[in-house]
Amino acid sequence: MDIQKYIDGILNRDVRSTSRTISLIENQDSMAVEILKGLYKHTGHARIIGITGPPGAGKSTLTDKVVKELRTRGFRVGIIAIDPTSPFTGGAILGDRIRMQELSVDPGVFIRSMGTRGQLGGLSKATLSAVKVLDAYGCDYIFIETVGVGQSEVDIMKLAETVVLVMIPGMGDDIQAIKAGIMEIGDIFDINKCDRDGADRLAIEIEMMLDLKGHFEFWRPPILRTQASIGKGISELVDNIDNHIKSLEESGLLRERRLNNIKVEVENILMGELTKKVHQVAKESGLLDEYANKILEKETDPFTVSEIILSKI
Amino acid sequence: MDIQKYIDGILNRDVRSTSRTISLIENQDSMAVEILKGLYKHTGHARIIGITGPPGAGKSTLTDKVVKELRTRGFRVGIIAIDPTSPFTGGAILGDRIRMQELSVDPGVFIRSMGTRGQLGGLSKATLSAVKVLDAYGCDYIFIETVGVGQSEVDIMKLAETVVLVMIPGMGDDIQAIKAGIMEIGDIFDINKCDRDGADRLAIEIEMMLDLKGHFEFWRPPILRTQASIGKGISELVDNIDNHIKSLEESGLLRERRLNNIKVEVENILMGELTKKVHQVAKESGLLDEYANKILEKETDPFTVSEIILSKI
């Protein structure tokens, strides 16, 4: 298939072209760039929602329920599930197999799981590209769902226009750290499994943190409660997502977020190109191997070697 | 203080020089590079142990108990606790305040918490530099402890020579994904809180995954059980860490891992330099701002803009 056929396929809502393009993106195939260039002017319609929170918070179930609610409201939805990935095999693990079953029979939902390929910043770059594809494919809402709470998850959440931070009551001290770490990227806080002990306490803690954060000019993150497994609170969560989108538009912040995302995107592409260059000059030439041995023998140090290699780029 | 004073201070086990050098590293102060250059030939003595696993697994308590055990065996120990960090404030949150109390009165233990500063790969670069400082400072063992299970944690764990993967029984489906994601970097599996229901099942699951992984030429990761809170199993864990180190040395894999780390280090430094260059050319010049607006208006796309900027670097 040539590039134009992929582009036409995606714009005509062909699942296979869309799915294969995302695979090309993951494999860093040079064709992917050409397809994305062609799609670019057809993007910008979709709302990008991030769903994140610690393991065990029930994010997948929550996302599924939110998506079903949006389907009953008549919208087309995409889900990109970011899976923690083996640094060796590079494959995405969960996602498709388990979840496809129920939602995949619905042609208005496109689900895809993505994993990292081990490169620096590679996942957030690939995720953003996949978002563009699903945007051009015609999704009204695109959900990016991450398992985990590290820096890479924060980076990915920065791609979203609305971030839902999912937490559950009673997870101990580590959760305190997590909350502090990703607190500031949450536009909506959701206490899932809210029937559990400690929900009130958690809500108070979040309120206190928000108070400490201080001034909210356009939007103070609401603290919601859900029990995703039985569908409780889902409709309210969807309403709040829409309210946040409206607030972003009216305040002019949506334009600002999008401009910022564009800058990040350009920088990611630039860094990707430079990384390739470094690989060529340092690795393929054998220069890095040669100097690594010298460094190990303490004949030189990594900073001096970097300067030498840099002078050759 | 000038550079040589810092270097001498660290080599003479002065806590203040050591601590301030790590701050210089975190702040990306250009002095840090000069100090690290001077320290480089005094490094290579310490063993680098990574401790990772999902939130709530009890990693801090486990690390503290392991460190105490190593202290009774007469070793000097460093701990670098990687904290999830606010992408806005950039500060490390936990660590010092809570844990310093007990261990910090012991001059044979150096504890430091580090947080990301928001840049790509920045944390693993800073962590590696801090490891070098503690190595030169005279630590026999250096522990790198991460909260979380994302790609950045995996990257950091690759800096370690021995990785202890801490898990606890009964954490549900997300944990399955986590296990699969970081499984392959574990040299030792530790089931902490092993008095809980599901410890046997977890041990069987890990065994099965190891079997699937297949062939282990030099070292099959052992599956240990601890109850860190009461000190149970700690001595055995320390013995296993030492056994792994011995196995690495005897098989020649230690040299290989170190060579590999050196290459990663050189690449990190190179990428850091190139990132600075990109910032200069794209941001400080205002070029990125100008083109971001054009991209938003769909007059051009990020790929074309990257090519333009790249041609100016």
Image (spheres, coloured by chain):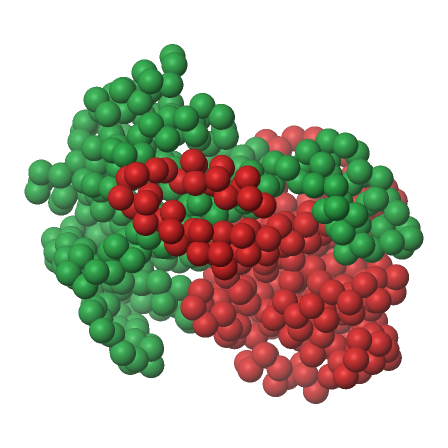
Chain colours: A red, B green
For the C terminus of chain A, the quadrant is top right
**Residue occupying the point 32% across, 45% down:** A294
Query: Is A23 placed above or below A121 here?
Result: below
Relative placement, left or right, of A156 versus A245 is left
Q: Residue A60: image x %, image y %? A: 58, 69
Q: Nearer the viewer, residue B178 or B231?
A: B178
Image height of A129 relative to B117, above or below = below
- Badge count: 0
Decide if residue A119 is on the left or right side of residue B71. right
Residue B46 visible (yes or no): yes
Is the residue A286 above or below the residue B33 in the image? Answer: below
Q: Quadrant of the N terminus of chain A?
A: bottom right
The residue under the point 27% across, 20% down is B8
Tell me where residue B144 appears, x and y as whole percent: 33, 45
Tell which of A127 and B224 is nearer to you. A127
| In-image side of A83 versus A50 (left or right) | left
Q: Furthest residue to the left? A: B73
Instruction: Judge from the rendering whether residue A307 lies leftward or rightward of residue A157; answer left or right.
Output: left
> Can residue A224 be seen in this snapshot?
no
The part of the image, by quadrant, that contains residue B103 is top left
Q: Residue at x 51, y 73 (%)?
A: A91
> Can you name the residue that lies furthest to the top here?
B1
Query: Which residue is at 62% across, 50% downward?
Result: A274
Residue A53 screen position, x and y as percent: 55, 56
> Where does residue A200 sit, x and y in percent of width and height?
53, 49
